[in-house]
Image: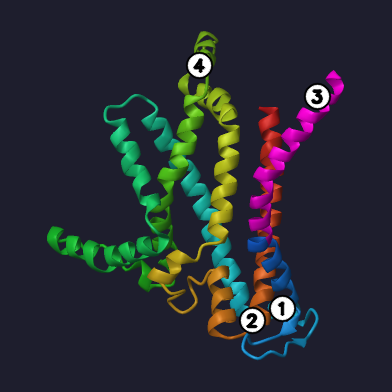
Amino acid sequence: MEKIRKNSMEKAMFNQYLVLVIPGLIIFTIGLIIPMIMAFRYSLTSWDGMIAEKTFVGFQNYINLFKDAEFKSAWVFTIKFTLWNTVIQNVLALLFAIALDSGIKGQKIYRTAFFLPCLISSVVVGFIWLRMFTNVLPEINNILGTNIDFAFFGKSSTVLRGLLIANNWQWIGYWMLIYLAGLQSIPAELYEAAKVDGANPIKRFFNVTIPMLAPSITICIVGITTGSLKVYDLMVSSTHGGPGHASTSIIYKTYNTAINGRQYGYGSAMSITMIVVLLLVALIQVKGLRKREVQA
């Protein structure tokens, strides 16, 4: 009798789990899985998105991608942006988190001030920094009598720098809070034990803080990397992929090809390669970083 009751309870719990999971699974399937399957199907065709006829071309679109200089250039820019963004945001977010966890006065105000920019749309952030670089900062130049060149968005050699400033201004506060939560979860006893063993602040940082922050580091690195690879909104409102094609990200290139260029088949091939790269990067990072968590 007790066994039957136990089985009945387990079945009821399983049904409750299904009720919670199925709606999300349906949304995930309709919103992501089906569009991915359709995109792969379109990538095998030469379709302009207008006519009903879709000419099957096999993997010709993928072969053409390797010959497309603009596609390669977009990937080069995206990789540069991702590498710099991942390093800068992780380092500064961790440093700010440590500073705000040290008990300085007004730390709640500082936390709020750092976090607020991430609540702003990336499109708005692009407009803000476009005005900063073209109007506000040059005016400050005039007031102070200095001659600093702030035309970052206007030159191919400096546009990456300008976009990094804008993107980091927006997102550092978000990742800082994740590191801050990780710091506050580290038991104080570990630091006390390290002090007793004669460890100085630097050794305590590398031997206690960093290993204990391993889960937070995993979240931040993977989140920043995948987010940087998908950057698009910021370019739309600030550089429009220019000057020339100097700040054309892979997502921006895909959108222009598929929508503006009416090459839906070719654009779909670009999007599929982007999905594959994102999955590979995320899997490699998670696997490697999780291994470090276990070792820590």
Amino acid carrying label 4: it is: Tyr
- Closer to the chain start, of discs 1 and 3, is 3
Q: Residue at the spot x=73%, y=87% of the render?
A: 54
Mark 2 near mark 3, Cβ–Cβ under 8 Å? no
| Horizontal and vertical percent position of residue 265 | 68, 81
Q: Residue 191 carries which label?
A: 4
Instruction: Give the left or right position of residue 181, taking residue 138 as reference.
Output: right
Instruction: Give the left or right position of residue 234, taking residue 287 as reference.
Output: left
Label 3 environment density (alpha carbons within 10 Å; few <14, some 14–19, many ≥20): few
Amino acid carrying label 1: it is: Tyr
Label 2 environment density (alpha carbons within 10 Å; few <14, some 14–19, many ≥20): many
Q: Is mark 3 on a helix, strand or loop?
A: helix
- Closer to the chain start, of discs 4 and 2, is 4
Nearer mark to the viewer, of 4 and 1? 1
Q: Name the residue under label 1.
A: 42
> Residue 132: which quarter of the image?
bottom left
Instruction: Give the left or right position of residue 121, taking residue 44 as reference.
Output: left
How far apart are the two marked residues, 1 and 2, measured between alpha carbons? 7 Å
| Horizontal and vertical percent position of residue 17 | 70, 39
| Horizontal and vertical percent position of residue 135 | 23, 67
How far apart are the two marked residues, 2 and 3, measured between alpha carbons? 55 Å
Q: In the depicted view, which residue is nearer to us: 14 or 172? A: 14
Q: What element carries label 4?
A: helix
Q: Give, as a single range, the part of the protein colored magenta.
A: 1-29
How far apart are the two marked residues, 4 and 1, measured between alpha carbons? 57 Å
> Relative to residue 264, is residue 246 depicted above or below?
above
State yes or no: residue 280 in magenta.
no
Q: Residue 264 carries which label?
A: 2
How far apart are the two marked residues, 1 and 3, measured between alpha carbons? 50 Å
Q: Residue at the spot x=67%, y=56% of the render?
A: 26
Nearer mark to the viewer, of 4 and 2? 2
